Image (cartoon, rainbow, N blue to C red):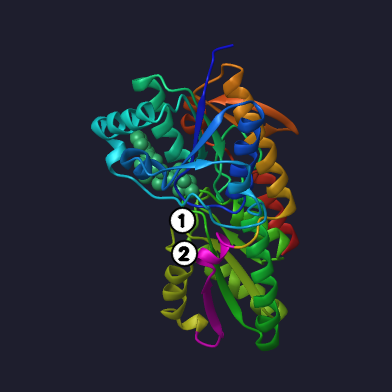
Amino acid sequence: MQDFQRLGVYTSGGDAPGMNACLRAVVRTALANDLDVTGIRRGYEGMIEGDFVELDRRSVSNILQTGGTVLKSARSEAFRTEEGRRQAAEQLANNRIDLLVAIGGDGTFRGATKLHDEHEIPVVGVPGTIDNDLYGTDATIGYDSALNTAIENIDRIRDTADAHNRLFLVEVMGRDSGFIALNCGIGGGAELVLIPETITEMDMVKERILSLMSAQRRSTIVVVAEGDELGGARGIERALRDDQDFSDIDLRSTILGHTQRGGAPTASDRVLASRLGLEAVEALLDGHADVMVGLVNKDLKLTPLQNVFGRRKSIDYDLLKLTQILS
Ligand code: ATP
């Protein structure tokens, strides 16, 4: 086994509940294996600037249950350039960091693989994003928490929607993927779910809403992913307000937005984050690099980063059918 000395760890891209639990696991596993640990603040931006902090056992005490990321996250345009990555590699070398754990999403891994290819730095990725859109793992860290937040909010909206027989358009996160929308739609009993993976036609949406509302004369909730091609909740609201057929319908739209990113991670996210954090360090020590750790059918699995961002994780289309039958 190669004699590694110092592991660097960073969180990058969109923050997700459970990133701190993962950081804690990475730090404690590394220390248990006699590695020193450096926290890299603000993702690739901090890597380029050398915004580093020494981490010991106590630096990660009491963060397991917190949302956000104590290392902070950032987007970095500079890191997209070869020169930016050269500067980052120089900072790592100057600080004797010879192993890296990257906690983030698709973009984070694209950057990590370039760093690995251009500067031969062993890096292992951990899937941390609320979108759950990464190939190579059944769930990403933060997804379960975001989903539960969305469902909790839909339950609240249902109470008030029912009191007034209102139609509510509820927009949830998911620019390119409908995992949150689909599953909170089922869990929250939404009457209609609109996601980016399917073609959504306004005529169909209008027809469906009208038939639901006339049949039941009660509340109707439409869950729409932000990336749905009709322009999210606002886009649909505009179209409905312009239509005479909807003039008698009491219509409201709500964008759940960043509430889905914040808050304490669920038990499931804490356990996932802890397992994946430990596995990432062990994979590096076993000589693996340029891979992502994931949980597939209950087993820990390594997937080459190229495959993670080269393939698209598909939603379960049976679930879409389920929303249609149950509504
Ligand atoms: P999320 O899915 O939650 O948005 P993410 O990791 O996909 O997370 P991005 O903003 O796409 O978030 O990527 C994070 C950072 O990774 C970018 O700010 C950039 O510095 C780096 N990055 C993304 N794509 C590339 C690329 N093709 N080459 C080099 N670096 C990249």
Q: Which residues are magenta?
A: 247-262
**Which one is in front, 66 or 276?**
66
Q: Which residue is mark 2?
A: 232
**Which one is in front, 28 or 310?**
28
**Direction from residue 88 to residue 240 in the image, left or right:** right
Looking at marks 1 and 2 on the same chain, the residue that comes earlier in the sequence is marked by: 1
| Tags 1 and 2 touching, CB below 8 Å | yes
Q: How many marks?
A: 2
- Relative to 208, is 39 above or below? above
How many residues crowd mark 2 within 10 Å: few (<14), some (14–19), many (20+)?
many
Instruction: State yes or no: residue 136 in magenta.
Output: no
Q: Which residue is mark 1?
A: 227
**Which one is in front, 4 or 203?**
4
Does the closest atom of ligand 1 sit within 8 Å of the Cβ of label 1?
no
Task: Give how far apart the Cα atoms at labels 1 and 2 are.
Answer: 6 Å
Residue 39 x %, y %: 48, 41
How many residues crowd mark 1 within 10 Å: few (<14), some (14–19), many (20+)?
many
Amino acid type assigned to the residue bearing label 2 in the image: Gly
In the structure shown, which secondary structural element does the residue marked by tag 1 occupy? loop
Q: Residue furthest left?
A: 83
